[in-house]
Amino acid sequence: MKNPSCILTVNLDERSYPIYIGTNLLADREVYQPHIHGQQVLIVTNTTVAPLYLASVESALQEYQVESVILPDGEQFKTLSVWQTIIDALLEHRFDRRCTVIGLGGGVVGDMAGFAAACYQRGVYFIQVPTTLLAQVDSSVGGKTGVNHPLGKNMIGAFYQPQCVIADIDTLSTLDDRQLSAGLAEIIKYGLIGDPDFFCWLEQKMDGLLEREHALLAYAIERSCKDKAAVVAADEREAGNRALLNLGHTFGHAIETGVGYGEWLHGEAVGAGICMAADLSRRLGWLDDSDQRRIESLIKKAGLPVYPPESLDADRMLALMSVDKKVLESKIRLILMNKLGYSVVTDTFEPEALKETLNEYGRATS
Ligand code: NAD
Ligand code: GLY
């Protein structure tokens, strides 16, 4: 193996797996080889990523029977019907239960490929090869897989851990600036759910990250994956604190569903969602004014929106927020900040305070 610059482990007993982070990993057969058990490999990718990176991955897998499925590109295609084309391909090529599914792409491809691996013959091997910043720091790690339903984001899915994650930082060179910013939203999230030093580091290094300085990106990816791996190892199936990884997401998912999947990027919706969570935390007296300003200013600096789209008023946001996997016994549960760098999962906030935040942000524009 050509030296990944970093190998982390997600510790989940017999389902533990490595995250390889580095450069020149995509075409390195030695990275894949220990994690492929049968002879058949299906690469799931999309129309944007295939021309960029499919040949490199195929070149690493010449000793196997390799087939590919190229999905249409976009969050609006993260549906059960598009997902079924992956299952169709596995069946058409007569793949057996020792086959391996590789998800090559961003979070949409990774979530769909993982869900196909979880369901095909009740579970086959799966490898994540994330190619967006967001996927490298978040969606490829932790085993959440699935698709959207028209009424709610990620409402159909399974927990299904990969054999390994191969994050090749070189792939980020073809990512556009808007997608880079979307990944930064999830990175900022880690600084706010238990890693205040990382939040301060991000305040100092944001300019360099936006300029894609390699060492800074590598450090941000490693630290994010380390933070996420620790949360997942402690609570794989989100019985408790894994929900912290959803900071900003209840607001964000409402935005994504409300404007139509694919209009706002997931990371953009999370960026505005984090600002709304900070506003509500401040209204509850849990966060200082100055801390709220620091959070908003970092989100802005990362090139992310602070406010939801004008088309979503407070009532519509509230209705959308009630279709969320964290809702229990009809109560909305949110991730709120109780100190800069620390968050809690809670349903003990005054509904009036939430309405004030929604009204305030529903009126404002970026
Ligand atoms: P995405 O998968 O839509 O990718 C963004 C865009 O970048 C797409 O157009 C894609 O084709 C393109 N792309 C991918 N790699 C590229 C590259 N190297 N160069 C150029 N273009 C490239 O979006 P995303 O932000 O990666 O992921 C968002 C999805 O991830 C959402 O569906 C979200 O729900 C999901 N998600 C899942 C988890 C999880 O734990 N499973 C966590 C966070 C987000
Ligand atoms: N991105 C949320 C989680 O993995 O739990």
Image: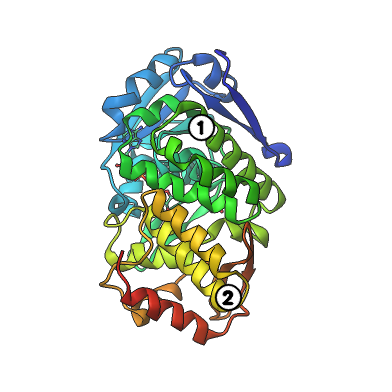
Residue lying furthest right: 13
Q: Looking at the image, can residue 108 be seen? A: no
| Mark earlier in primary sequence (2, 1) | 1
Q: Position of residue 218 (x, y in %)?
A: 52, 30
Nearer the observer, disc 2 or disc 1?
A: 1
Q: Position of residue 78 (x, y in %)?
A: 34, 51
Residue drawn at x 26%, y 26% is: 51
- In the picture of the structure, the residue carrying the numbered disc 2 is 328
Q: Quadrant of the N terminus?
A: top right
> Dot 1: what SS?
helix
- In the picture of the structure, the residue carrying the numbered disc 1 is 216
Residue drawn at x 54%, y 60% is: 247
Q: Identify the image quadrant of residue 41.
A: top left
How many numbered marks does the figure carry?
2
Placement of 1 over or under 207, stated as above or below: above
Placement of 268 over or under 257, stated as above or below: above
Residue lying furthest bottom: 352
Mark 2 surroundings: few (<14), some (14-19) or many (≥20) residues within 10 A: few
